[in-house]
């Protein structure tokens, strides 16, 4: 992993973004101390949340809370 100072990162950001788009990860440092990592965007997290939402929707299908009154439950929670 390449290390680059914050000032140089600011100065050479277009070149760094080009390298990152090719899969490279770059550590940005400030006075020699790592403060950030510049790496390619990962779409997997986006799709994972969609899959989780779909699983929750499937779980909820045909499930009913018979006999419960939502307004009464809310009022009971306020006590």
Image (cartoon, rainbow, N blue to C red):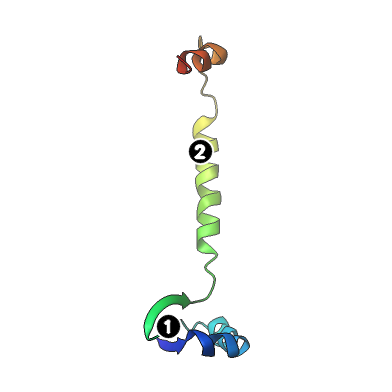
Q: Nearer the viewer, mark 1 or mark 2?
A: 1
Q: Which mark is residue 13?
A: none
Residue 43 rendering spot, x and y as whole percentages: 55, 64
Secondary structure of residue under mark 2:
helix
Packing grade of label 1 (10 A; few <14, some 14-19, many >=20) is some
Residue occupying the point 51% across, 9% down: 67
Q: Which mark is residue 29?
A: 1
- Disc 2 designates what residue? 56
Upstream in the sequence, badge 1 or badge 2? 1
Q: Is residue 70 above or below residue 62?
A: above
Quadrant occupied by the N terminus: bottom left
Which of the pair 79/38 is nearer the observer?
79
Residue 21 rendering spot, x and y as whole percentages: 57, 82
Residue occupying the point 49% across, 34% down: 59
Q: How many marks?
A: 2
Which of the pair 71/55 is nearer the observer?
71
Which of the pair 60/19 is nearer the observer?
19
Camera sees residue 12 = no
Residue occupying the point 50% across, 38% down: 56
Marks 1/2: CA–CA distance: 41 Å
Q: Is residue 31 left or right of residue 66?
A: left
Q: Residue furthest left?
A: 33
Among the 4 quarters of the image, the one containing residue 30: bottom left
Secondary structure of residue under mark 1:
strand
Packing grade of label 2 (10 A; few <14, some 14-19, many >=20) is few
Camera sees residue 63 = yes
Quadrant occupied by the C terminus: top left
Q: Is residue 43 above or below residue 72?
A: below
Residue occupying the point 52% across, 51% down: 49
Among the 4 quarters of the image, the one containing residue 17: bottom right
Residue 45 rendering spot, x and y as whole percentages: 50, 59
Q: Is residue 34 left or right of residue 39?
A: left
């Amino acid at each position: 992993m390449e290390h680059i100072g914050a000032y140089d990162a600011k100065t050479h950001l277009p070149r760094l973004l080009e390298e990152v788009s090719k899969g490279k990860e770059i550590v940005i440092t400030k006075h020699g101390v790592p403060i950030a990592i510049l790496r390619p965007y990962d779409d997997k997290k986006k799709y994972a949340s969609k899959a989780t939402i779909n699983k929750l929707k499937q779980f909820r299908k045909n499930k009913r809370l018979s006999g419960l009154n939502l307004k009464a439950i809310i009022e009971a929670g306020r006590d």
